[in-house]
Amino acid sequence: MFNKWFCRLSFACLAVASPLAAAQDTGAIPSDWMLCGDPGSPAHQHEPQPFNAKGDEATYLDADESRATDNEIFDFSGDVEVRRGNQRLNADTATYNQPQDTVEAHGNIRFEQDGLTVEGDNARLQLGARHGQVEAARYGLVQRHARGESSLLVMEDPNHTRLTQATFTTCNPGNDDWLLHASDLKLDHEKSIGEARNVWLEFKGVPFLYLPYINFPLSDQRKSGFLTPSFGTSDQVGTDIQIPYYWNIAPQRDATLTTRVMSKRGVQLLGEFRYISPTGGGLTNIGYVPYDNVFDKSRTFLSTHNVWNFAPRWSSELEFGYVSDGNYFGELGTSLSVASTTHLERRADATYHGDFWSFTGRVQSYQTVDESLPSSARPYQRLPQLLVNLNLPQQAYGSNALFNGEYVHFYRRDSVVGDRIDLQPGVSLPLVNAYGFVTPSLNLRYTQYALDQQTADSGGSSPSRTLPVLSLDSGVYLERDMSWSDAALLHTLEPRLYYLYVPYRDQSSLPVFDTNLLDFNYANMFQSNRFSGADRVNDANQITVALTSRLLDKESGRERFNARIGQIFYFSDRRVVLPGNSTETLDVSDIVAELNSSGLIPDWKASASLLWNPQSQDIDKSTLGFEYKPDNQRILKLDYRLRRNELEQTDLAALWPLSQQADRRINMVGRWNYSLQDGRTLEALLGMEYDTCCWALRVAGRRFVSNVGGDTNNALFLQLELKGLTSFGNRGKRGLAGLLDPGTFRY
């Protein structure tokens, strides 16, 4: 909803001091100001002369004319230059007092020290003490592309600078599109802290923000302070203003506390807490609306995720989510991905990692966001779940010994509840060489239940199931050299056969706690069970026939292209099904085909998958994706998704420059997620950016489905960025691209 940078561009940054701190920086001009080109001011065009050698603190003077008084006071005129250490002073005339080690200069003053250049009318400097002042100063920072003016610039000592009636901007000379003003500015370079009083900003000559006092960091170090506010509007909340405050608690802990004012709904308080420690880290988000004027109640949201390694070999994880009502995300969120949240997980894990085994203890439940769902449609709680996994490689004759064990207690209101024990000992014998592999495997799966609240026609309170699972996996690697666009490639053909046998057991009396039919894809054709969870184990007498072909870069080993195709041939019907489904009698499965290309054609990525039903001659599922990305400013992405009788969607996203000139450009970002099946737009976004040398203006509009009922929300975002200073409005971490959901564009 709002953005937080770890360097924390706070209200503190609304002053000239933070860029001035970069006077010590000798790096290149940041890429944000590439449009500015050559700054062009005399202060920046000056041809630098070599400074004195390091440690040389002698004073060097040069001028067209000179006059000495008692060999103590020297008057210079005409192209005067005074150098000492890394300090250099140029002027029309200058007087050097040798006993006091001071210089008074007049006319076309130019002073340089540690990358800071200052021009003015009059200057008085004490070179040894590095103390001095410049009147009517005009300063420039080449490395930060910054400049400004001050009626009086005082260098109190090497670590303290003070400016009176100062301005600051990153615009080129002659262009004051935006200016920062401060009546008094103090900089402490040793503590990296600055203070400013009576601060105001103007844009295009119009003042628009005033702050009586600010303090701020002079480096990239984080510091507590107000962040820049965000502005927007939407159908659900009306005018939306967010005012964040950043709290730098400690070097590895921070928090952001935000006051969100919504004209329709009232005030929302938001908080984010982050921490990193030697044993782990975590992130917590909180949202609280004391009283929603539309909802007529208070509203709350909490989400936390934490990971710890609290002892040798021990790790733990905590995930917890809570929301006060099912419409919270749809009405207070800002995108389709937030509004479509259906469940919030609550889980705590503790895991011990042995050399060849691990043990996990878990408690897990979910909050169903859609409160209208009946109990039978909600997930079970695991209170608790205990998992043991053992893998002992290189046993007798090169075999691998395996064991997976689980105990879990399931609970759900008004449903069958109980305990389940699932044990899977097994052994495999991998026979591998350079041209292929054969791996026979044998597993035994035993499952026992202790049930309560079961129906009268169930199979009793203690049903069980014992099944052997036999598989034989084999493959061959065929290779040849080839080339593509002058690149040396290795082309492979990898045929694979996977046989699976599991005898039939009637499992209709077993409950269904956490089991679903796995999505049918290429990887799952080589699984021993087509169901997730332990409540169903498929009967199988089948063989999977598959072929994979790859193109590998011989120099880097990177995979540039792969294509896979496969099909399962069934030798018997599949009689084990989930409740409500009938026996599967087809002799063959859908044909699965997948294709991925990354780097085969420069700047292009492509992927496709297909499930083709040979019985109905229809496509059951397919995906298609293209991405063109010559650089981070030009990205075009198209995705297509189809599940027969369920969904058919297209998703088009683009980040593209519309106009590029020497000192400005116009960019656009857009996204259109459309449901072909429903004939409606799920989410649409259009944004434009006018980007100049020293500022950028971004405007974006978004429309998205906000709830399962199909209601839509329209939102408008506005952002003004003053480069090198800060930004106002709803700022994305990557400008326009930041308005898109994470992962839409991969960086």
Image (cartoon, rainbow, N blue to C red):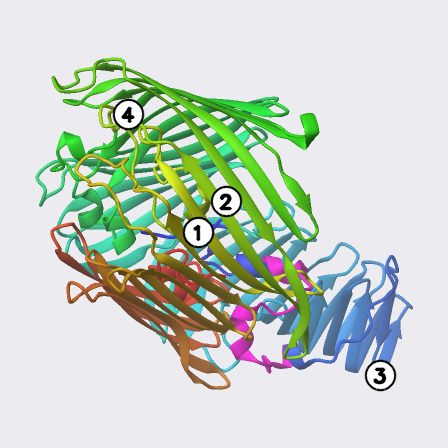
Q: Earlier in the sequence, mark 3 or mark 4?
A: 3
Instruction: Tell which residue pokes out farthest to the right in this image.
Output: 71
Q: CA distance from mark 3 to mark 1?
A: 51 Å
Q: Residue at x 17, y 58 (%)?
A: 713
Query: Does the image show residue 34?
Result: yes
Is 333 placed left or right of 249 in the picture?
left
User: Label for residue 65?
Assistant: 3
Task: Indicate which disc residue 10 carries.
Answer: 1
What amino acid type is highlighted by mark number 4?
Answer: Gln
Pick the front one: 492 or 572? 572
Residue 262 image point, x, y percent? 19, 50
The answer to whether residue 438 is above or below residue 619 is above
Residue at the spot of label 2: 223
Inter-mark Cα distance, 2 to 3: 51 Å
Whether residues under marks 3 and 4 lie with C-beta atoms below 8 angstroms apart, the answer is: no
Dot 1 falls on a residue whose secondary structure is loop
Magenta stretch, residue numbers:
21-43
The mark that comes first in sequence, 2 or 4, is: 2
Which comes sooner in the sequence, label 2 or label 1?
1
Magenta span has 27?
yes
